[in-house]
Image: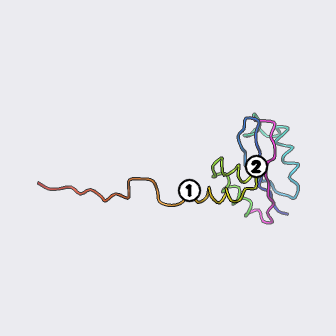
């Protein structure tokens, strides 16, 4: 038995990323649709499944869920479209040098 990571588009346009154990995701999606649990999607129904992936190991699914939850909206949209070039491009944009003033030489105090 494995686990799914999935992404829903909610009625308000927001995304929900979750995971579910087992080999049949339809039961979990139905629970979101009926409001079986008073969570994030409860007041944002109806929901639409826009992406899912099955993992053989639940630990891999949990790691993927956490990673995707941290992604930007644009990167999540690219994943849902299956646009891997954009997913990679968004990943590259977040790396690199930090945009802070820390690259300047430190100022030293002068004694009089």
Residue range of the region highlighted in magenta in the rendering: 44-58
Q: Which of the numbered marks, if any, corresponds to residue 33?
A: none
Of labels 1 and 2, the one closer to you: 1
Query: Up-down: is 59 above or below 31?
Result: below
**Toward which corner of the image does residue 33 lie, by quadrant?**
top right
Using a 10 Å C-alpha cutoff, classify the residue at mark 1 as few (fewer than 14 neighbours), some (14 to 19) or many (20 or more): few
State the image coordinates of residue 73 (x, y, percent, origin top left): 65, 46
Using a 10 Å C-alpha cutoff, classify the residue at mark 2 as few (fewer than 14 neighbours), some (14 to 19) or many (20 or more): many
**Label 1 close to label 2 by CB (< 8 Å):** no
Q: Is residue 46 magenta?
A: yes
Q: Which residue is mark 1?
A: 94
Q: Which residue is mark 2?
A: 7
Tag 2 or tag 1, which sits nearer the N-term? 2
Is 102 displayed left or right of 65 in the figure?
A: left
Color style of the picture: rainbow
Q: Secondary structure at mark 1?
A: helix
Q: Quadrant of the C terminus?
A: bottom left
Front one among 25 and 108 = 108
Name the residue located 76 percent from the left edge and 49 percent from the top edge. 7
Residue at far left of view: 112
Q: Secondary structure at mark 2?
A: strand
Is 73 displayed left or right of 3 in the figure?
A: left
Label 1 to label 2, Cα distance in Å? 22 Å
State the image coordinates of residue 17 (x, y, percent, origin top left): 73, 49
**Toward which corner of the image does residue 36 lie, by quadrant?**
top right
Query: Up-down: is 38 above or below 89?
Result: above
State the image coordinates of residue 50 (x, y, percent, origin top left): 79, 48
State the image coordinates of residue 77 (x, y, percent, origin top left): 71, 49
Query: Up-down: is 32 above or below 105?
Result: above
Q: Quadrant of the N terminus?
A: bottom right
């Amino acid at each position: 038995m494995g686990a799914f990571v999935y992404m829903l588009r909610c009625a308000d346009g927001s995304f929900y990323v979750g995971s579910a154990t087992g080999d049949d995701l339809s039961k979990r999606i139905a629970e979101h649709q009926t409001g079986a649990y008073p969570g994030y999607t409860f007041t944002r129904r109806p929901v639409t499944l826009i992406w899912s992936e099955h993992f053989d190991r639940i630990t891999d699914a949990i790691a993927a869920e956490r990673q995707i939850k941290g992604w930007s909206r644009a990167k999540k949209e690219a994943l849902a479209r299956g646009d891997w070039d954009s997913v990679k491009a968004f990943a590259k944009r977040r790396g690199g040098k930090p945009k802070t003033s820390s690259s300047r030489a430190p100022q030293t105090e002068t004694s009089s």
